[in-house]
Image (cartoon, rainbow, N blue to C red):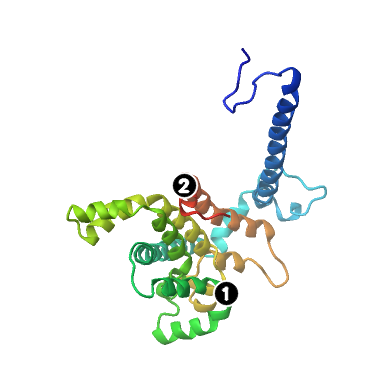
Amino acid sequence: MQRVSGLGMPATRPSGRRWGDWFRYRAGRWLLLAVTTVFAVIVIAPFAWTVSTSLRAPIDSFSVPPQWIVLRPDWTNYQSVFERIPFLRMILNSFIVAGGTVLILLAIAVFASTIFAKYRFKGNNLLFTIVLATIMITFEAIVVPLYILVRQLGISNTYWGLIIPESLTAFGVFMMRQFFYSLPDDFMESARIDGANEYVIFARIGLPMAKTALLALVVFHAQWVWNLLLWPMITISEPSLRVLPQGIALFKGGYNTPYPEQLAVSVIACLPLVLLYIFLSKYFVQGITMTGLKG
């Protein structure tokens, strides 16, 4: 009897008519591995170059031929980052803005998506269509009226001026609505028969089951807020309230740009997002799968 692999294909080289099937299977696997490797190199190469250049002296930044491996790393670039700008303060500001924005978004998205997905009322589809249509409006198209509104509310140059506008996005409502819509109604109906009210159903059934989708939304929105530059540049003029993207922009001079120092700032700014994805990657993939979203 011929030994068979876990994928249903022969583990050893067959003979006779099945040789063609074996060859196509092996060729397909090698082709998939080659394509995956090429895409991995394309994605990783810019990050590797950023880290490598951040550890060089300014005179070696544009050396020819380029050197990927730094034999003598120059850590003064990272030291000068903390000396030239209040970098720690900017990191704290970014954490405050990203954390506050994500919390408000989660609260709005969970409640709104549950109502749109699990409750039938007149105008449900119309209201959801209106909310969904706001995704097509670019931020640049509303930035001027949004700034006027923030000024009139008296929250410009404050944390709230950054947090509130960045937390009001329809993407979170859409993503969570897709998840709750896929959940069977039997769970909620069984709880109602047992005498549970809507708040208990939401807290003990809806939220625990939405854990993976919520964590996926955290990764999505946190990285978007963390990298946002246009709105902070418009609404924040107080140096003590600047966030990390503004700090990176400060290293670009009019006549000379210290590229190693600027890339050192970029490396430090990327670390929180990399750690966030490493710890939440399992939930991120599960949440994307369960909500039906595709990249």
Amino acid type, residue under disc 2 in the picture: Gln
- Which one is in front, 142 or 55? 142
The numbered dot on residue 293 is none
Q: Secondary structure at mark 1?
A: loop
First reached walking from the N terminus: tag 1 or tag 2: 1
228 sits to left or right of 30 = left
Q: CA distance from mark 1 to mark 2?
A: 29 Å
Residue at far top of view: 1
- Which residue shows up at 57% across the image and 59% down it? 81
Q: Quadrant of residue 35?
A: top right
Amino acid found under the numbered disc labelled 1: Thr
Residue 138 badge: 1
Which residue is drawn at the image coordinates 63% and 25% (left, top)? Answer: 9
The residue tagged with tag 2: helix, strand or loop?
A: helix
The residue singled out by tag 2 in the image is 286
Q: Quadrant of the C terminus?
A: bottom right
Q: Is residue 71 visible?
A: no
**Closer mark to the observer between disc 1 and disc 2:** 2
